[in-house]
Image: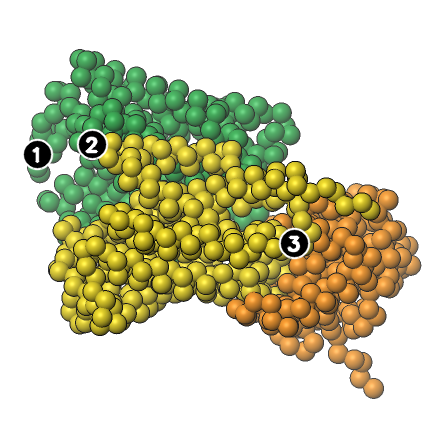
Amino acid sequence: MTARPALSGPALAQLRVGPGRFGWLWHALPWGLAIGTYFFAGAYLTLGTAALEMILFTLSIDLCLGYAGIVTFGQAAFFGVGAYAAGLLSIHLTPDPLLGLLFGTGIAAIVGLVTGMLILHTEGVTLMMLTLAIASMLSAFALQASSLTGGDDGLQGIHISPLFGVFPFDLWGNTAYLYALGVLFLWFAAAWRIVRSPFGRSLDGIRQSPRRMRAIGTPVWWRLVAIYTLSAAMAGTAGVLKAQTNQFVGLDSLDLLVSGTALVMLILGGTRRLYGAFVGAAFYVVVQDIAAEFDPFRWMFVIGGLLVIIVMFLEGGLMGLADWARDGAARLWTRPAPK
Amino acid sequence: MAYLTILLDGTAYGMILFIISVGLTVTMGLMRVVNLAHGAFAMIGGYIAATLMQRDVPFFIAAILAALLVGIIGAVAELTLYRPLYRRGDLAQALMTFGLTFVVIAALTSLFGSNVKPIAVPAFLAGLTNLGFTDYPTYRLFLIAIGAAMAIALWLIIDRTLYGARLRAAVDNPRMARAVGMDVNWLFTGTFAAGCALAGLGGVLGADMLPIEPFYALRYLVIFLVVVAVGGIGNFKGSFVAAMAIGIVDTVGKFLIPGTSAYIVYVLVIVLLLWRPHGLLPAKSAA
Amino acid sequence: MTAPAPALSVRGLSKSFGALQVAQAIDLDLQPGARLGLIGPNGAGKTSFVNLLTGMIRADAGAITLNGQEIIALKPERRVRLGLVRTHQINTLLNETSLRDNVAIAVAERENYAWRLMRFTPQWRRCLAEAEAQLAAFGIHDLADRRVAELPYGQQRLLEIAIALVLKPRVLLLDEPAAGVPAAEAHAIHDVLERLPAEIAILMIEHDMDLVFRFAREIAVLVQGRVLIAGTPAEIAAHPEVRAVYLGRGTA
C-alpha cells in the first residue's frame, strides 16, 4: 500500500521477501509455528483450525486487494458459496471431503468468474459498491432459499467421511487441523508463485496505474478477471474448510462482517506481504477468543480501534512494524560500505 | 387498494432513506471521501434521542437535539479522523471508517445492550388517519410530509444560497474552488457536520422502519451506499430520486414477490450500475 | 508508381461532448517516417485527438486506419499491440516500481509473457536485459534500480519515451514530451527526440515552438477541433491565419 524507502538495492526488495540470506528461516518460522501448534495446542486446536481457515481467506483478499488493487468488501460471498456448496454436496451426494473441496472451490470460482466479468470494468467506489451489492444479494438469497440452505438455522446434517478413507474428522480436531494446514500450504505456495510471476507483476502495475498498463497493451480487464476468479476460488476453499471442519454452515458465512473482519486481519498484518495474512489472522482469532470471554463486543472495539490506528499511523500493519524494527537493526549492524 | 398502502409505505421508507443518505452523497461528492461510518452516525442519533426521551424529553426536541449532537460529533470526527485521510485515497478511508463503525457498534452495545431500542412515536402522531380508501398510520404520513419538506428546504439551500453555490462549485472542482479563495476546509467540516446531523435526524425519525440496534450501522450501510451510487455521487436531486425509487421498489417487491424481496433490490442495483456506472443522473456531464 | 500507404490514416474523425465539438471531421495522413507537429491554441482539441486515436475516447464518427487495418472499433490495448503507441502529457508511470521493472514489464507485455504464472523464467530475464539496454540507450542506466517516484521530473519524462519505444511502435504519438521539464533537463529530451528511429511515423503535440520547428518536417494547426491548415514549417510560420489564431485576432 505504501512506498518504502529502499534500504537494499534491487527493486525486488519492495516485495519484502525477507532477508535474503535467511530466507529459509523466514519461511520456516510461520510454518514451524503452525506445525508446533498441532502438537502443543491441546484444547485450543479447533481455534487453530479456525485461524488457518481465516488465514486462507485473508490471503485471498490480499491477492485481490493488496496486489491487484481491487477494492472488495464482498469476498465473503465466495466464502459462503464455497461453504454452502461443500455442505450441500456432503448432504446430498457424497461425504468425501476432497470431492467437497473440489466442488466448493469450483463453484466459488465460477461465481467469481461470472461476477468478475460483470463488474470489473468499473472501478473505485462503483466497483466497491457492486461487490457489496453482490455479497448482500447472495446473503439475502441464502436467507430466502431456506429449503436449500436451511435459512436462519443454517445448513445442518453435514457429515464428512474420513480423509483418504483413513483419518476421521473427530471432536478433537486432529485431522481437521492437518487437513486445513495442508490445503493452506498448497494455496500459499500457489499464491507465492503467482505474486512473483510476470502475471503478478502486471497486476501490481494495474494497481499502480491502469492507464499505464493499457498504454503498454495490457488487457487489463482480463487480468483482473483472472485474479478475481483465483481469489474467489481461494476464498471458496476457506469456506469449504470451515463447513467441513465445523460440519455446519451458518448465514453469517456470507455476512458483510466476515468480509470486514478479513479486511481487518489483512490490514493488521500488512498488505502485499503474504505472511501478513498469517500474522493478522492469527492475531485476530486469538484476540477474539480472549476478548469473547470477557465481553462479546469488546473484541469489536479492539479490532475496530486497531484498524483506525493502523490506517492512520501504521500504514504497513504489524508486518510494517517488523520491517521498521528490522530496518533499525540492519542500520545498527551494518556500516556503510566505503565508496 | 392495498397497492396504495404499499406505495405510501414505500414513499415513507424512501423519505427516510433520503434524509439519511443525502448527507452521504454530498460529502462523498464534495470531499471524495468514502464514508462507511455514515450508518453509524444515523444510529448514534437514534440512541441519543432514545436516551433523551427516557428522560422525558419530548420527541421533537429530542430529535433536534440528537441531530445537533451528531452534527457536533461529526465535525469533531472530520477534523481528527477524516481530514488526515483525504490525500490517502479510497481504500484508506474505507478501512478507517469501517473500523470506526466497529468501534461505534461495540461502544453502543456496551452502553445499551444488543436489544432494539424503541423510540416511541409522540401520541398525536400515533394511530391511524382515515384517508378515505383506508386507515393509514399517521406517523408514516408525517414522515412523507417531513421528508418532502426537508427535500424542498435542502434544495432551496443548495440552489439559492451562497453556501449552496459554494458547495456546488467545490463539488464540481475543488482545486478551482480553493484557487478562487474559498475556505474549503471550513466548507468541508461544516458540510460533513450537516450531513451527519441529517443522518442522525433520519435515524431518529426512521426508527419505526429501521429499528435502532447496535448492528444498524452495518445492516443498512449497503442500502445507504446503494442510494448514493444509484443517484450519482454528489448529486442531490439524484439522491432523492434514487431514495424514492429504492424505497418504493423494495417495499413493492416485498409485497408482490415475497420470496425474492430481499435481494431483488440488489439485483436491480447491480444491473443499473453496470448500465450506468455513474448513477442514474450523473452529477457531472462528461468533461 | 503509387505512393506508399500511410502508416496512420484518419478520415472524418468527429467527437462532441454535448455542445462542445472536440473533433470536427478531421482528416489526416501520417506516412512512415513522418515527423508531424500538431499545434494549436489551448482547448483546440489536441490531446482529445490523441485520445481518440488511441481509443481512450470513443469517436462519434469517422475511420482510423493503422497500416491498412481499420482500428476505430478496437480497444486501446489492441491498438497498442498493433503498433500505435503514445506518451502522456503528464507522466503516467508505475511510481512505486523501479525504472528497470517499468521497462521490463512493457517488454513482457509486448512479448506476451505477462500472463505467465511461472516465476523468473528465462524470458523474464530477457525482458530485464532488454530493459537495461534501453535504459542505457537513454543514459539513465545507473538509475535502473531506483523507483520512479524518486526521480526528477525530466528523467521520468525520458522514461515515458523509453517505454514507448520499447513497445516497437509503428506510429508514435508524443503528447507534449517536453512539458513541465525544467530548461536544464530539456536538452536530454531534445536529444532523444532527434535520435528517434527514422522509420517510425511520429506525431508530436507541443507548445514549445522552437522544439516543434526543429523537430517537425510538417506541421498541422488544430483549432476548435478542425485542422485549420497543414504544411511545412516555413509555410505555417508565414501564414497570416495562424498568427491570428495565436494572437487572438481573426478566427473566433
Q: Which chain is mark 2 on?
A: B
Q: What residue type is labelled 1?
A: Asp
Q: Is mark 3 on a helix, strand or loop?
A: helix
* Residue position for label 3: A11
* Residue position for label 2: B114
Q: What element carries label 1?
A: strand
In the rendered image, what is the letter of the chain coloured yellow?
A
Q: Where is residue B2 in the image (x, y as percent from the top left)?
A: 11, 45
- For marks 1 and 2, the one nearer the N-term is 2
Residue at image coords 21%, 54%: A172
Q: In this view, does C238 lie above or below B48?
A: below
* Residue position for label 1: B135
Q: Where is residue C188 in the image (x, y as percent from the top left)?
A: 85, 53
Report the front residue among A308 and C210.
A308
Q: What residue type is labelled 2?
A: Ser
Q: Is residue B175 above or below residue C36?
A: above
Q: Tell me, what hue is chain C? A: orange
Residue B41 visible within the image: yes
In the rendered image, what is the letter of the chain coloured green?
B
